[in-house]
Amino acid sequence: MEIPVSWLKEYVDIDVPVELLAEKMTVAGLEVGAITYLGVPQGFVEGIRWPVSEHLVWDREKIVLGAIREVQPHPNADRLVIALVDYGGAELEATVTGAPNLFPYKGVGPLQSPLWTPFAKEGAEVWDGHSEVRKRMILKEKPLRGIPNRCMVCSEYELGISDEHEGILLMQQQPTNTVTGQPAAPGTPLQDVLGDIILTVELTPNLARCFSVLGVAREVAALLDKPLRQPSHEVLMEGAGIAGEVEIEIREPELNPRFTLMLLRGTTIQPSPEWLQRRLKLVGQRPINNIVDVTNYITFEIGQPLHAFDYDKLKARAGSATPTIITRLPTPGETLETLDEVQRTLEPHNILVCDRAGVLSMGGIIGGAETEISDTTTNVLLEAANWNFINIRRSMQSQKVFTDAGTRFSRGVHPSQALLGVQRGIELMRQFGGGQVAQGVVDVYPLPAPTVQVDLRVAEVERILGMSFSAAECAALLRRLSFGVDVEGDVLHVTVPDYRMDISSDPITGQADLIEEIARVHGYNQIPATIIADMMPAQRANVELEREELARDVMVALGLRETISYRLTTPEREAMLTPGANSTSHETYVELANPLMAERSALRHTLLISLLESAVANARYTTQQQLFEIGNVYLKREGEALPDEPRRLGILITGPRRVESWQQDESNTPVDFYDLKGVVDGLLRGLHIGGVSYARSTHPSLHPGRSAQVLLNGRALGDFGELHPLVAQNFELNGGAPLLVAEFDLDALLERVEPNYGVLPLPTTPPVYQDIALVVGEETTAAAVEATIIKAGGNMLKGARLFDVYRGEPIPAGHKSLAYSLVYQADDRTLTDGEVAKVHQKIVKTCERELGAKLRA
């Protein structure tokens, strides 16, 4: 939110540099993201630096306030005029300009009331209004169509106020000198008239009280220990009473706790005062007319949004009856055309402001077009209401409409602000447009908000903050924030201001909230660093997390990168993982009631969908992908409100084995099934999980001949292999190298992690290497042969590795030859040839007996 310092000073005296103020606000929780300087020099405070964009400083001698006394035609150019400007000098300065907003005054003679404008003298530095790129220029005397010209009347762009440069900045009313508070005379330095500093405050949702200039002023007053000046809420009511002119009917008090109305008769629609227009522009609002501008002004001044109705239009809709404002929920199929010219279909939860003829506006968010203020409006009915913040937030999201009013109501505005807002607003409308305010306020308040009171013990303040405060000190700090405080011994009985909706009424939470306020105002940077006095709790290991982190470390050590993806997908998207599946049942999914995106509507069942979506995105930038993800999947449980959330480990690799380089490397072929199996073996070794076996996988997303299932004691731990070609085609990933994927039950894996595993010493004796080739039937797996070899070899056999598989002559049909490299070694001696031969023969005989294997000649 933009906070002009000039506006802030209306409510609190600021006697410190703005840069120091910004630092204090940020430390107290109101983060100032940037400081914008309009015409004034940047301040300097030792040790404090703020990001500042390039800005123009208005020279106090050369850029001043001017008063245009007459506008004469240019003798040699129809598109130029000569402005005679009083700049406080001995004579008027003739200045040539092409500003179109001066042409209505051309040739009418001396003006009865001068036009006030920024005036730059010769030598002044301004932004070049005729350059296509933003650059500075120094004014120098030069003739314009035969008329000498050394000065300039300026546009907002040339002064760096805004990008507006269609005309010069004109003020019909004499501006005020912000230093003296008196009317500014010609020649007053423009810094003292229009110079300002804008604080960009990054407000978080919990700071609802600060979504206004007055709200920020309260915080500043507390931080600087200055009194706060409240805006006036007094109203001059001279018109006939409002009783009988309008009625209010609230049908949903939980959604609309309060609704107030006041009536202004006989007003005139016209431009707002220039000071108010200037303030609105500084906070990013476009001035429209005096009535609409006041509603926007009050929204930003005190944080209470208002809405103005054309009262005569309401009477016309009511016919002969008294207009009745009704707040209710919509009927099925009801629509509303809002002020942004959008025809909206209303949803069941959208709270509405209506009359008996139909819908007038969407409560707390945006008005309707039928009863809006127009140039012919003379009677204004002003609304200030209060709305349920959760319902407003939900309606803004569902209708995709975001307004300043909705932003404030969605954070929380106290019902008490409605009466203050309607009184302040109607009086400003009377001052700016004339007319008479009807006596009285129509105020319906079916759900009054309770007053929050919290008892705070001083000992608790010291325990939480780690420093000593007296009861008087705590009370003084809270009173600076407008809390009511009664001190009784070491207990503070605190009454919370109504606008502080962030202070809990719960005794425990409320105490913590108040202690936070004491710390903020005292200054977090003033709290000394101390060592905790309480006994440290017993330290307990989080075994689940430690093992999960171990799995991550192992995957990274294997060369893979971790991805973190959305948990949300769609059932239709996951159906693409099954070849030939045309549809899927939504009943097995946990679905969102109000998804933000159509493609993120349900919680996923598998990590494969997330990994494949990452692969699709990454394929545009790289051919090599080696990814893994650890995350939850969500499986709906019959009869249970919440789903089961098991953890999964997903793996995806594709592309060349090594990153391509300038060297030709014919061995750098794409990864295949055995590369992925190596990753899986590395994972199991890293987790110290032994005794696993492999079986043919039936996973529908995997290639039936190039996939496997990992088993441990008969329990499936996961599946891995090449992605099924039809699935790859569904994701448009079938144009290059094969995709290898895996998904494991991480909970089952981590259960089998052996924390106490053995470590073998480095061998001190030489090994003996021998090969063995066995002919077995096609149905016999290599894993079974390897297990038999290892069992028969005993302690002397240290390793067995398959290095060749052969089919063909002279191997009989239906058989294959498996060749293994065997490593024999003893820990205490060098083996003899006889010892090795004996064990080798035992291995051959065992394989013949148990597997029907024959030693290949």
Image (cartoon, rainbow, N blue to C red):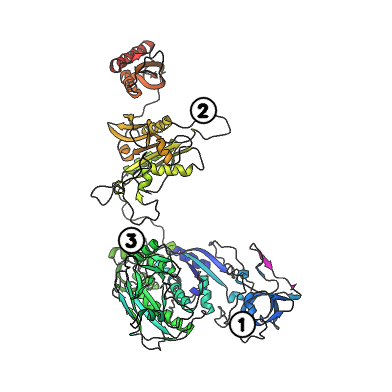
Check disc 2 and report the residue beneath it: 667
Q: Nearer the viewer, residue 331 or 568?
A: 331
Q: Is residue 479 visible?
A: yes
Q: Vertically, is 679 above or below 643? A: above
Residue 597 is a magenta residue? no
Q: Vertically, is 324 above or below 24? A: below
Residue at mark 1 to residue at mark 3: CA–CA distance: 59 Å
| Marks 2 and 1, the one that precedes in the sequence | 1
| Marks 1 and 3, the one that precedes in the sequence | 1
Please name the amino acid that badge 1 sits on. Answer: Ala
**Side of 352 where 430 appears, left or right:** right
Check disc 3 and report the residue beneath it: 463
In this view, the mark in front (1 or 3): 1
In this view, the mark in front (2 or 1): 2
Q: Vertically, is 119 above or below 845? A: below
Local SS, label 2: loop
Check disc 1 and report the residue beneath it: 185
Expressed as whole percent of the image width and height from the top left, the position of residue 300 reads 45, 72
Please name the amino acid that badge 3 sits on. Answer: Arg
